[in-house]
Image: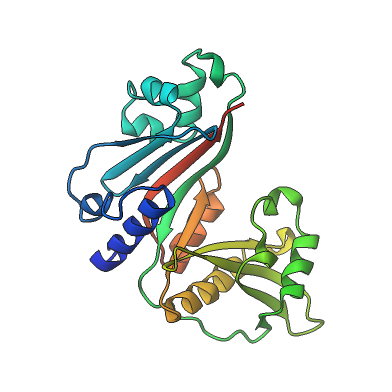
Amino acid sequence: MELESGTRAIVALVWARRLGLPDDALQQAAMGAPSERLAVPVDDGSVLFLRYLTGTVLCAPAWALEVLSDYDDDTLAASAGLVRALRGSGHDDAAGLRSSGDFALYYLDDPVNVEPSDTASVSFEREHARLLEDSSPKDDIVGLDLSGREHTFTLVADEGQAPLATSSYNIWEGLIADVATVTLPQIRRHGLGAYITAVAADDALTQGYTPQWRAPRDSPAAHQLALDVGFLDAGSVSTATLG
């Protein structure tokens, strides 16, 4: 299976806008045509490497663009590849380099079949999302801001209304729903995270958005959840911060 052409075009448009590129910068890659790497100079101390279908974009300071021009796309797209390449350069500005995210990108364009649960219900109350965040290990929720996102969905037990798993999404460029999910550690591996993610993704599709799932490259569970819900792999994004 592959994403529909309309979905591929939407994702290409959103990423182009988020990276400050012309709207059509990634459309050729979205349609599967061979594309050259786009090198974008930035001066905000960040480095980003995006692989989307057949296209790639590298945003970095001028010196980093020069260093990374010697590396092929497969190397930079590999887990921690961006950080290894820059640190290996020996450049003074790479001394304080740290990774700020290494994700596989998944998208969904088919409707999700979500059957009502017999033992839990879905809450749209932010307080339930906040309660789940408070009960989760800090490493699991850092940077996610589940309760602060525009749309929140929390699976709560019918008995006692205890929150079990939360999925929420923000809207990117009015077109993509960026979805994130956390399940309480003690009840993982029972499909609850996939269930509430499907609920959030189905809501996004109903509202006319394309669901996006960013799976940490070192989290097999996040990749499996994406597959369980029906997301399709379309690329990766790695980011790092200098200094």
**34 to the left or right of 224:** left
**Residue 35, position in %: x, y?**
21, 42
Q: Position of residue 8 (x, y in %)?
A: 29, 61
Q: Quadrant of residue 100?
A: top right
**219 relative position to 233: left or right:** right
Q: Nearer the viewer, residue 49 or 59?
A: 59
| Tally of numbered discs | 0
83 relative to 155, above or below = above
**Colour logic:** rainbow
The vertical placement of 50 against 241, above or below, is: below
Q: Residue at x 48, y 16 (%)?
A: 88
Q: Residue furthest left?
A: 33
**Quadrant location, the C terminus:** top right
Quarter holding residue 207: bottom left
Q: Residue at x 39, y 43 (%)?
A: 50
Q: Work out whether residue 72 or residue 240 is closer to the camera in this orientation and state it.
A: 240
Which residue appears at 67% of the width and 68% of the height? 165
Residue 132 image point, x, y percent: 75, 66
Quadrant of image for the N terminus: bottom left
Residue 96, given in percent of the width and then of the height, sits at 62, 23
Q: Residue at x 76, y 58 (%)?
A: 136
